[in-house]
Each structure stands twice: as C-alpha cells, then as structure tokens.
Image: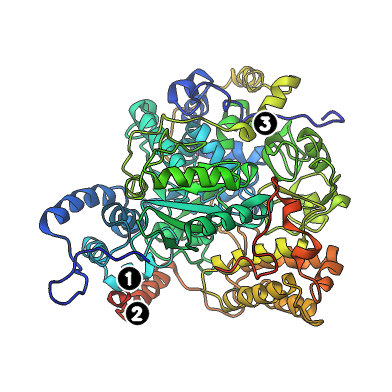
Amino acid sequence: MTAIDHPRIPGSGRPRAAYDDATRERLAADAAQVVARYPDPRSALLPLLHLVQSEDGYVSPAGIAFCAATLDLSTAQVSAVATFYTQYKRRPNGEYTVGVCTNTLCAIMGGDAIWEDLTDRLGIGHDETTADGKITLERIECNAACDYAPVMMINWEFFDNQTPDSAAEVVGRLIAGEPVAPTRGPSRVQTFKQVSRVLAGFPDGLADEGVAAGEPTLRGLRLARENGWTAPSVDAAERDAAQEQQAEPAAPAATSTAPAASAPQPGGEQSSVDRPAAGAPERTAEQEKVEHRADDTSKPADSEKES
Amino acid sequence: MADATTLTPVLSDRWDADRPWDLGTYESRGGYRGLRKALTMDAADVVTTVKDSGLRGRGGAGFPTGMKWGFLPAPDGGPRYLVVNADESEPGTCKDIPLMLADPQLLVEGVAITSYAIGCHHAFIYLRGEVVHVYRRLLHAVEQAYAQGYLGKNVLGSGYDLDVTVHAGAGAYICGEETALLDSLEGRRGQPRLKPPFPAVAGLYARPTVVNNVESIASVPGILVGGSDWFRTMGTDRSPGHGLFSLSGHVQRPGQYEAPLGITMRELLAMAGGVREGHELKFWTPGGSSTPIFTAEHLDVPLTYEEVGAAGSMLGTRALQVFDDSVSVVKAVSRWTQFYKHESCGKCTPCREGTFWLAQVLGRLEAGQGTSGDIDLLLDLCDNILGKAFCALGDGATSPITSAIQYFRDEFEAGTHTPADVLFPPERASLFPYTPRRSGQLAGAH
C-alpha cells in the first residue's frame, strides 16, 4: 500500500482537513462555476468530488471539508455520498487507474486472462496501487464496449480488443513514463488528476482528438453501405408531409403549451417497477424530501475516522 | 417489409463521416432540421407527433415515449425538467456510448426538441463517469450548439430559452434506474425512490420531470423531420421504428447493427458472420444480463417488445451477448450475480441480502462444491427477491439465474461435483490461447 501523503497536522500525524488559503481560493473559484450549472447547489456535489480528486488524487479529508463548506452540508453527508460511488477513491490513487473488465462477457472472452496476467506482473490486486504510485489496478464492471471485448480502461479511456500481451505492453509503458494512446480517445491518456478535472466539467480541449468510432461500431453501417440498404428516406417523407400541410400554414412557436394532463397510475406501465407498497400512505414529494434530509443529518458524523 | 430484413441506418447514418461529432458535419448532413421544424409547431403537436410515431423507450422498459411526456401535469409556472439517462451500464449494453462518441449533436438536437415539447428550460444529460472521452465530446457538442444558437436564450430566434447541463456520474450501475439517477443528480447516494410519485409528477427537485434514454431522445429529430408515418414504415405496429442491435461475444463480427424492430437473431447473426468458427450457439441475452437468457430455439423470435416478452424474456436494450458451446452457463451466471451483488445499492433488504446469498451459492456451484439442495435454494432466493424491492435491479439479478436453470439444469447439477472450469476450460472460450493460473479457485470476488 502506498503511503498517504496528504498534509498532516504537525506533531499529531492526523491529516489536516483543510486546504491552505491559496488552494482553497483557487478551488472555490472552480467550485463557483460548478455550482452555477445547477438550480440547486447540492447537485454540484458529484462534480465537486471529482474536482477534489483532481487536486488530491483521491477524496481527501480536506476535500470533504471543502465540499461540505461549499454546499453547506455536514462532512458526514459528503462522505456518505463519496463512499457510494466507485470512482471516488478513499486512498491516494495511482497516476493511472488500469481497469480490466471482468464482467461476464469480457471475462469469458479473455478478461480473466488479462486480469490474472496483470496482477501477477504488478504484484497487486483489486483496488491496490503499485509502490511507485503509478498504477492502481481494478476489476471493473461492464463499460459499454462489449463489441470490443475484452476491454481495458486506463483512466476511463477505451483500450479495446486487448490480450494479456497488449495489456502488459501498455502498462509497461505507463510504468516507464511513456505516453500511451487509447483505441478510442485522445492521442494520449491523461493522468488521474487531469481526467478528474474533466469529469468535474472542465474541458481539456481534447474532444476533437481521436476517432469517431472503432471498427465494430461501424460494422452494421458498412454492411448497409455495401448492400445499398438504407432507411426509408426522411426527405421524401418530409416533402410528402409538407405538401399535405400546404393548405394549413404552421402556427408560430409557442413557448410552452401543456400536453393534456393525465397522471400516471400506480401499477401502470410507466417505469421499470411500478408496484405501490400495499397499504402505504401516499406521501407528497415535499414530505419525502424532508424525510430524506432528516435522514442525512441524523447520521453519525464519523467521516473523519476513515483516514 | 420484405422477406429478408435489411439494416436501416438512421441514428448510425453519420458515424462514418469525417469528424461526425462536429457541428459543421452535423449541419451539413441534415442536422437541426428537426429542431427548426419543431419550433414552428405548437409544443403539444410535437408531443402528438412523437406519440403517433409509437416510439417506445429504448432504455429497456419500452414505455411509449410520447405518452411519458404527456404524463406531465399542466404547467404551474414552476420549472419542468428533462433528464437524459446516459448512464449506460447494463452488462452487454453498448449502444448509447458509441452513439454519443460519434454523433453527440444528434442527442443535443433531440434534447432541444424534447425540452421544447414538454416546456422545459433546463435539461440535463446524466452520463456515467467512466467514459471520459464521451464526456469531452458531449461538453464540446453542447458548447458548439450554444455558440450557434441551438441552445441558450432565444433558441433560433423563437423566443424559447433552453440551458443544457452535461453531468458526469461517478460509477454506480444503479444510477441507470431513473429515480436513483435523479437522487444522484441531486447530489445524493444513488438510491431508488418509492413510486408513486412518478418522476412525471415529482422528479428532479420534486418537480415534473421526464427521464428518457439516450437512444429514445436521439430518435426524436428523425421523427420530427420524417414524420410519425415515416417512423412507422420501420418495425412492427406495436414496436415501430429503428433500433441499435449490439452483438457481442462469440460472433465473427461483433458490433452495432441498426435495424427495424422485429428483425430476428438469426438474421442478425448471419449479418455478423455467424457464431465463432467451429462452435455452436449455446445461449444469448436479448437485452442485457437482466433479461432472461435465450437459446438456439429462440433464433426466430422477432425482436420486438411483445414477441420477446411472449417468448419469456425482454427486449431490454437489444444487447445481444452471444455465448457458444465453450462457455459454462454456471460461470456466466455466477459472474453476473457477482455484479448485481456489487451494484445493489443496499436500500432494500431482499436485494441487498439476496444478491449476497445468490453469489455465495453460485460460487460454490461454480467451484463444483454445491450441495444437492442448491438449485432449489437459488430458486427460493430468487422468489424472495423478485418483485420485493423498490426497483428492478433485484428482479434483473434473478433473470439470468432462473432462466439458466430452466434451460441448463444439468449444468447446475454438475456443480455439485465438478468445477465449471473443468467442465468448460476457460481457455477454450477466450479469443486467444492462455493457461489459466488459478483454475478452480472461486472467481469474481471483489
């Protein structure tokens, strides 16, 4: 396990749960931009936690305190959120997160082999970091690239169609400090901190780099082109419709007209699971909100213990 | 429709263009015609057009999209929201991510049209956090759309205002469930809410909210340009339109195939070059790991919501994961169960505890150390989860187990004496030769 290198209170060894003034001011300026994106400041919490990781390489006690102060939450409320999501790290992360998909399909197609090989080579397991702080290894869940299996993600960039050899080669270059390029992504994988800043919603100017699609993404389209298969023409449909409507000119734009109101019924088909709890009194959304918030604040304030 | 179904690229039509993510490319290929047209229409008529098209939710549940929009209560002067579910995380599902990587403007246009239709002035795209380049492309697309007047104040001079925020999640499958997504977007742990109230009545910030999948929203611009009748020239009466079919696993040419709903797996497999050479199809998922598995006997089931349902599964997200005869179904199901255990948010006891026990029992069956009562135990556990939690995650966890026992009971019985890796050596299933180093050990624990 790598040493935790966040600032400590002199003499006590306990982590200092605050940024120095310059850092705090810089982060506060960023945070103000994040908060401004949302009607409700609390929505900024996930991006702010990414922002903290861009500063510290993990969700540090100082970062938790910063988020809490920015959004007027308790540190316990912030910790409760931070510990729910797998991308938030509770210990300093390596410069590169190497994630091998070991969900069923990738695992079977060779992900298990890649995983076994990398753990043996690096001498670390899931959610562990190499002694030099370069690599944090993770078994990851399905990353929506199954047609490119087996998939490896490095700092959440796609490395498609991997083999143990190709994965080892890429990881070897990372350790040697050489740049590596994802299959679909920018020309160079950015560091964990850099990527965390993007995930906080601050563009790094790399959107135009890389391909639009890999070969599997384009297979159906290429097959359609080869065979002259197309969808029915929208242009023809549009012309037909326009001719029909010529007698009746289009109405000017209205800003918002309500569609007929018809409330969804319990047990209706509207969503994935629509079974009302038997006999449960219907609560208003406001009541729910109040209960929700009450839950949050009644949790024991134990967030500082974890470091 | 002719006898042999052919592909119908609509959403995927620009993917092979030069820099298709760029607004210039998008405009030169017909982009934003749908929005221009929508802005000349009454908002209620836009809703009607989408209702008439019969478009059904492409995120799995298949609920009619236009009807969902119509569920919003009458305006009360307060805000109404559109939230796009771009949290694509269902094992096997891999359609929205490539769509947004290649052609993010299509989604942005769909967002603008939908927002206008439902009277929303601030829309959100909730993207899973583990796809940073897709996030870059979306941020860039929104920035370009603002600069060209497709978003922001007075969209295209119509007097309609719209802001769009692209939000990155942080790694949690459960946030694909619409109410968990809303809690997450509100800066909380992503845990599902009890319904009712439905999001249409009390969604984001307890305000009327429409939550739609990426592919559903991306289908809207085409419907506006071509009209509802055009959309209905594809697919079937009750499952109209085009959809992305994602083939993965043991097929010769895995990838995205955009076809009318109602195409069959046999047709898609033929297009993808068939199952891996020298092997036979063993089982497949029609719509991701949460949909009951199918076998070779289901190859001719038309892939529509109704017909897949009637055959005992769900169309889901058209995530067609193909497994050939080299694969242990026990191992496959065991690994999926590890996933559900890992991703259960912990709110509801049957799911939190049940997935834990399912994983334990499947783990020992996979290791060849199961007991004679384990199959019944699994089915009993599934019975105690199915329909007994707030959301569909627990239900989804039971689907692969109960369906796999239905079709391959003997393999589970073999789990009482022989490890899955002995019956089905993993190096025969992988795409490259290797020597498993820890064969026989309980796999997947994390």
Callouts 2 and 1 in the same chain? yes
Query: SS class of the residue under badge 1?
Result: helix
* In the displayed structure image, the side of residue A124 where residue A114 appears, left or right: right
Which is more N-terminal, label 1 or label 3?
Answer: 1
- Residue, disc 3: A219
For residue A77, the mark is: 1
Q: Specify few, some or many for label 3: CA neighbours under 10 Å numbering under 14, 14-19, or 20 or more.
A: some
Look at the picture and state if A273 lies above or below A117.
Answer: below
Measuring 37% from the left and 33% from the top, which residue is drawn there? Answer: A206
In this view of the protein, can residue B131 be seen by the observer?
no
Q: Specify few, some or many for label 1: CA neighbours under 10 Å numbering under 14, 14-19, or 20 or more.
A: many
Q: Name the chain under label 2.
A: A
**Is the C-beta separation of discs 2 and 1 under 8 Å?**
yes
Look at the picture and state if B130 lies above or below A205.
Answer: below
For residue A69, the mark is: none
Displayed quadrant of residue A163: top right
Q: Position of residue A127 (x, y in %)?
A: 45, 63
For residue A299, the mark is: 2
Callouts 3 and 1 in the same chain? yes
